[in-house]
């Protein structure tokens, strides 16, 4: 694999770290759900608003951030994103009431919306198309890694220092991410992350690449539903375990970490499987969807004991572990210079789902007073999305050639 170079590995590392710090600070708030509920007297609906507000802000920012990434570079966009998240977190930490706190979370979401376009470009701009699912899945482990660390550390820190100081630790990490963005900007200006220009050995034009993609609406529906379910689990799992199974806050945080740990390993595995065995990344997502539905049915049925922990692992692997393959699917038809815009447009479905479904499931809980009703509702949504993607016809789309210097043999695709 001659294309694996220092810029490829550094871009992947910076992208993964940026996703981890951003997630630790925003979506990691779910690990503090019981503390936040007590501090601000939040209802279940308002706890569900936490990821919803993060991704509502991200929904607003994602398309402009995609254009900004392609126009100004990944480094500058990454710096802006990290400073934006940090600003929102500072507002939330200074809040004395629920509404200023929720406003700070929404501001952090605006910064979060710029993270994925920048990190997608950093992670895959020099990677052959038929290896993107693996690389994007590795990069997306930053999300699950951030959640894992948040679940393992934030409840313990909150018990010792208070939740405000616990979350305040993350601001320093975001500032480190902003510094990394400045470093990337300087390397971009020197052409370090630019693909080398090469003339094909046979003297002919570099061949185009053909990819297999489903319809746009089923793809968007899948992203909408699965992202909403994923963040509902991130926001509600600790509260559910405390309320229904009598877990302590610390043990519930460990359970959330277990789910995110499983998702870390699963994202890499699903990415490799999708690149290696499936002509379309959509087929992998249908398989993941089936596993997600099975896990949700089990938790809705009220499994307990060791079986519950196995279900939590399956939830992490499928309900949280799908994101990297989806990223590869939405960027497959994009030309080399349009990765940022393709990411920004494709993420609108994901961010819309997180803005809508977690609060909606919170309303289901508040009206029914039943967590089983919440999980059965989520199961139904997952089955609808998975079925729509499974029956959607696959279309062969010809896109621009691979990054210069990547041969047809390296891509593994024939046209």
Image (tube, helix red, strand yellow):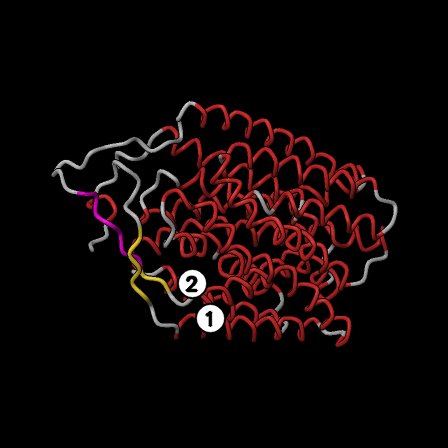
Q: Quadrant of residue 96?
A: top right
Q: Quadrant of residue 311?
A: bottom right
- Residue 310 visible in the displayed image: no
In the picture provided, is 132 more to the left or to the right than 207? right
Q: Residue furthest left?
A: 202
Vertical comparison of 93 with 246: above or below: above
Q: Residues within 10 Å of mark 2 (few under 14, many from 20)?
A: many
What residue is at 49 percent from the left and 64 percent from the top?
A: 220
In the image shown, does 215 or 25 lie closer to the viewer?
Answer: 215
- Residue 336 visible in the displayed image: yes
In the picture provided, is 381 more to the left or to the right than 87? left
In the image shown, does 378 or 181 lie closer to the viewer?
Answer: 181
What residue is at 62 percent from the left and 36 percent from the top?
A: 82
Marks counted in the figure total: 2
Q: Position of residue 111 (x, y in %)?
A: 64, 43
> To which residue does mark 1 refer?
386
Residue 285 is marked as 2
Residues in magenta, as a range: 205-211
């Amino acid at each position: 694999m001659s294309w694996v170079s220092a810029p490829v590995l550094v871009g992947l590392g910076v992208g993964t770290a940026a996703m981890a710090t951003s997630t630790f600070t925003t979506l990691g708030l779910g690990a503090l759900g019981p503390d936040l509920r007590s501090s601000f007297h939040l209802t279940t609906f308002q706890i569900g608003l936490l990821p919803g507000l993060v991704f509502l802000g991200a929904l607003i920012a994602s398309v402009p951030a995609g254009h900004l990434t392609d126009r100004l570079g990944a480094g500058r966009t990454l710096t802006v994103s990290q400073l934006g998240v940090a600003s929102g977190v500072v507002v939330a930490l200074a809040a004395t009431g629920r509404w200023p706190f929720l406003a700070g979370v929404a501001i952090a979401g605006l910064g979060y919306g710029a993270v994925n376009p920048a990190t997608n470009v950093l992670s895959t701009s020099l990677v052959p198309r038929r290896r993107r699912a693996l690389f994007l899945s590795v990069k997306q482990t930053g999300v699950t890694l951030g959640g894992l660390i948040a679940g393992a550390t934030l409840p313990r820190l909150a018990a010792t220092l208070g939740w405000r100081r616990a979350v305040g630790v993350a601001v320093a990490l975001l500032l480190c991410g902003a510094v990394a963005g400045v470093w990337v900007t300087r390397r971009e200006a020197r052409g370090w992350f630019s693909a080398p220009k090469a003339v094909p050995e046979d003297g002919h034009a570099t061949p185009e690449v053909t990819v297999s993609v489903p319809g746009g609406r089923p793809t968007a529906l899948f992203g909408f539903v699965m992202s909403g379910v994923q963040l509902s689990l991130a926001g509600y799992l600790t509260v559910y375990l405390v309320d229904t199974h009598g877990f302590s806050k610390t043990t519930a945080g460990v359970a959330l970490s277990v789910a995110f740990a499983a998702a870390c390993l699963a994202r890499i595995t699903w990415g490799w499987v999708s690149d290696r065995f499936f002509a379309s990344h959509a087929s992998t997502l249908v398989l993941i969807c089936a596993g997600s539905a099975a896990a949700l049915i089990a938790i809705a049925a009220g499994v307990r004991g060791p079986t519950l922990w196995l279900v939590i692992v399956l939830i992490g692997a499928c309900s949280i572990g799908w994101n990297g393959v989806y990223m590869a699917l939405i960027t497959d038809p994009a030309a080399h210079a349009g990765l940022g815009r393709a990411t920004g447009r494709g993420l609108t479905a994901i961010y819309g789902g997180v803005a809508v479904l977690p609060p909606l499931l919170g309303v289901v809980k508040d009206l029914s007073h039943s967590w089983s009703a919440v999980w059965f509702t989520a199961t139904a949504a997952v089955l609808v999305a998975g079925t729509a993607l499974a029956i959607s016809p696959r279309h062969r789309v010809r896109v621009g050639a691979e990054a210069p210097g990547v041969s047809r043999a390296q891509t593994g695709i024939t046209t």
